[in-house]
Image: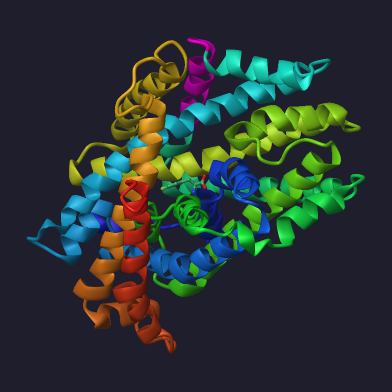
Amino acid sequence: MNNNRSTFATKLGMIAAAVGSAVGLGNIWRFPYEVGQSGGAAFIIIYLICVAVLGIPLITSEFLLGRRGRANVGGTFKKLAPKTKWGVIGYMSVLASFLILGFYSVIAGWTLEYVYQAFCNGFAGQSSAELGESFKSFSTDTYRPILWLALFLAANFVIIQSGVKNGIEKASNIMMPFLFAVLLIFCIRGLFLPGAEEGLKFLFKPDFSKIDSSVILRAMGQAFFSLSLGMGCLVTYGSYFSDKTRLAKTSVTVVALDTLVAILSGVMIFPAVFSFGISPSAGPDLVFITLPNVFLQMAGGYFWSILFFILLAVAALTSTISMFEVVTAFIHEEYNVSRKKATAWIISLCFVLAVICSLSIGPWSDFTIFGKTIFDLFDYVSANILLPLGGLLVSIFVGYRLDKNIIKEELSNNGEFKVNYLNLFVFILKYVAPVAIIIIFLSGLGLLG
Ligand code: PFF
């Protein structure tokens, strides 16, 4: 089976797919509102430290495991640690993928509605309060969000069932350059708005009095989510890397580009928000309520709003395909189901979960478990429990269980070049990452107050 297993066809395609997974709603929707709510530049500095110290070694570890295992996430652990319980990480990853896909696809569906609204000039003439009302009435509606959700999942189906080279890689090759180009246009536009300096100050001038333990923990959680860490996604993509891929270099590239997009999203959003006198701390609604408001006040707003929501939809799509690939590869390889059949089943199941999530915001919002709606519960369990746990297990597996020679062989492409950071790499995985992740984990469960 492994002889005819796919690999990415080109280096650029491989980078586009991996960066496409990392860059998503986490960067453009979640990062700016987290920055807005956590005091701007101080949050960003902590975020950067987390990304560099934890992100790079953990991404490298996931890539390393995937390429060595040359299998889906469950198969990889089974191969590298036969007859042990490590294969359980496969099931955890599948569970985390479904939970994230459940709520993430709902938000992705919203972005399509907003593309449509923008095309129809639907924001025109609305006050901020009315924009807020429209968002609320749309997001709590029974049918309309489900319609968009179905359309979004159909796009995922087309890409995933076409395979790694012809589906994921081709789609990423088209979508990622578009995403970068649009983001740059927005940043340049934002910088020329009157009063843009206030927004830039908010982003880049740290106020260290704003840093407390909760900000640190939020920044770490954001880093995990944004880098697609802890649920086998990068293990799966790593299994499609060629033998020539330099793993550490690729991780640094993914981290650098993902972080760049997060910061550029800040540069795109905050100057505009400040320029039009809107509060930067609007929270999760920032993108859906505040930005249409900003676009309404901007010259050429009609055009900008269409472009912005397309950008958001594209970013979401390159991330969801990576989550679907985790499950598709798992079912296809572990249970010998054809790729097409596996994709159809998985997307249908995801549709059911996402419909439940969508309804839990609207008509079923009174139904709660542990005081949370199903939508919030999926978000909470995946981001605060499953991702940190997955990351913790990966760091322990590579740090303690995996033969150091295997690490060395993978990092040096079988001795092709020298790896002078090997000891530092293993030290971080053995000690730094587990301790840091346990702190996120406990605080995520509310056990650290
Ligand atoms: N990294 C994606 C984002 O920032 O939107 C979200 C994500 C994708 C999380 C893939 C986890 C994952 F496996």
Q: Look at the image and give the residue range highlighted in magenta.
A: 141-158
Q: Main secondary structure of the magenta part?
A: helix
Q: Nearer the viewer, residue 54 or 145?
A: 54
Q: Position of residue 412 (x, y in %)?
A: 39, 82
In which image quadrant can residue 367 be found?
Answer: top left
- Residue at the (79%, 50%) spot, across then down: 199
Q: Is residue 239 visible?
A: no
Where residue 448 appears, as percent x and y from the top left, is: 34, 53
Q: How is the image coloured?
A: rainbow
Visible in this render: residue 371?
Answer: yes
What is the x, y in percent for residue 431?
A: 31, 75
Q: Is residue 273 magenta?
A: no
Q: In this rendering, is residue 254 above or below 1?
A: below
Query: What residue is at 25 percent from the left and 46 percent from the top?
Result: 92
Front-most of residues 187 and 62: 187
Relative depth, front residue between 360 and 425:
360
Horizontal placement of 278 versus 432: left or right? right
Q: What residue is at 54 percent from the left and 45 percent from the top?
A: 26
131 above or below 442? above
Query: Residue 32 vs residue 103: left or right?
Result: right
Describe residue 100's horizontal placement relative to residue 196 as left or right.
left
Number of dots carrying numbers: 0
Residue displayed at 78% across by 40% down: 273
